[in-house]
Amino acid sequence: MSDKLKIIISGGGTGGHIFPAISIADALKARNPETEILFVGAKGRMEMEKVPAAGYDIVGLPVAGFQRRLTWKNITFFFKLAASMLKARRVVRSFAPDVAIGVGGYASGPVLKAAASAGVPTVLQEQNSYPGVTNKILARKAKKICVAYPNMERFFPPSRIVQTGNPVRKNLLETIERATALKEFELDGERKTILVVGGSLGAGSINKGLISSLEAIREREDVQVLWQCGKYYHQDLDQQLKTHGLDNVKLMPFIARMDLAYGVADVVVSRAGAGTISELALLGKASVLVPSPNVSEDHQTKNAMSLVKEGAAILVADNETEEKLVKEALVLLDDIDHKKQLEEKIKLFAHNNSADQIAEEVEKIAKEKA
């Protein structure tokens, strides 16, 4: 094997898949700058923008998700899947990778299947406590399955499991001056801060929970809210906020500097995606989690419950946000002992060097292949 490795990284769709994928790529390049990396994603999805911005080449497949409800889109699903398989085979053949890594998302299935069929060793990065159907199938031929949660032997061959945790954005680990973070978002250093994030695309139920409780937020002059609502929801929510005239709510469509946002957060309200939970654990943030019901295998609820059972987070059901979400966040903000307990307990779920561990496993497999 030459010193120059060639690696395909496939998957994406949401920030929860894309940022760990970029972290793995960065770790591989840090270990060996000669490594050549090609991403394969889904056309029209976030990765087609975020990956080039991080300095990597990406190829897009026409693949899309299968809808669980009856819809005409499922007719085109099979045509797009077939076209994606053909293109994935061409990409694997022309790039000739030493290893292919799947991080989850629409593109991961066709690419890893094509790689395995071509004799390329594959590595899965399973982020959730309950894997989806695609990863269960892909695991049958994977050389290694890098997982974030214990007891994954229920789903995967024990001899191929490596517990690495989920990679997080490397800038989250840098020391943040609180004053710098407050200035970035024009926040008041005398107020306690609730950070609200509904994932990179926003979350309608979390947004409704906030809107329905604006008067409760107004009454708390010692509290401020930094709120990432999602680009799709921003214009409407901005108009609603203006009619209320609150000075303690900062609404943003997307927060690029999550390192600074976490730096000012006393309590975090969030979806329960695996990547987000890994970030919260690494930073020791007291959290109110609202699992999305719109994901396969209901894996966000399973992710959240793995923390709740250990006293490491609070869960509010998606259909209860209007009644409970802000109330729970404010109660937690005021309960210093409970807040401290959550901060300490969630740290037990943290993995500090996940991306580097995964990169090491990939290099080992490449050497074995050689």
Image (cartoon, rainbow, N blue to C red):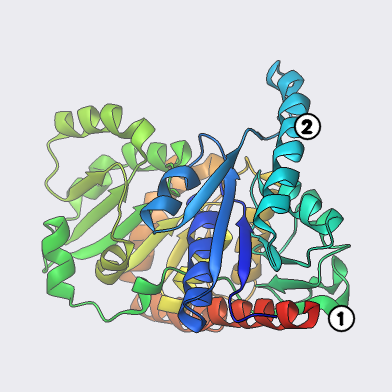
The image quadrant of residue 358 is bottom right
Residue 346, compared with residue 183, is above or below; it is below
Q: Is residue 65 visible?
A: yes
Q: Pick the residue in front: 298 or 144.
A: 144
Residue under the image location 77 percent in, 79 percent down: 370
Residue projecting furthest to the top: 72
Residue under the image location 36 percent in, 72 percent down: 172
253 lies left or right of 97: left
- Disc 2 residue type? Ala
Which of discs 2 and 1 lies nearer the camera? The answer is: 2
40 lies left or right of 140: left
Q: Pick the residue in front: 294 or 71.
A: 71
Q: Crowding near pointer 1: few (<14 within 10 Å), some, many (20+)?
A: few
Label 2 or label 1, whichever comes before in sequence order? 2
Q: How many labels, in total?
A: 2
What x and y, as percent, mark residue 73?
Answer: 68, 20
Q: Is residue 284 visible?
A: no
| Residue position marked by numbered label 1 in the rendering | 159
What x and y, as percent, mark residue 266?
Answer: 30, 69
Quadrant of the image for the N terminus?
A: bottom right
| Residue position marked by numbered label 2 in the rendering | 82
- What element does badge 2 sit on? helix
What x and y, as percent, mark residue 77?
Answer: 73, 27
What is the distance, in whole Å, between disc 2 and disc 1 at their CAs? 32 Å
Residue under the image location 70 percent in, 59 percent down: 96
Residue 239, compared with residue 221, is above or below; it is above
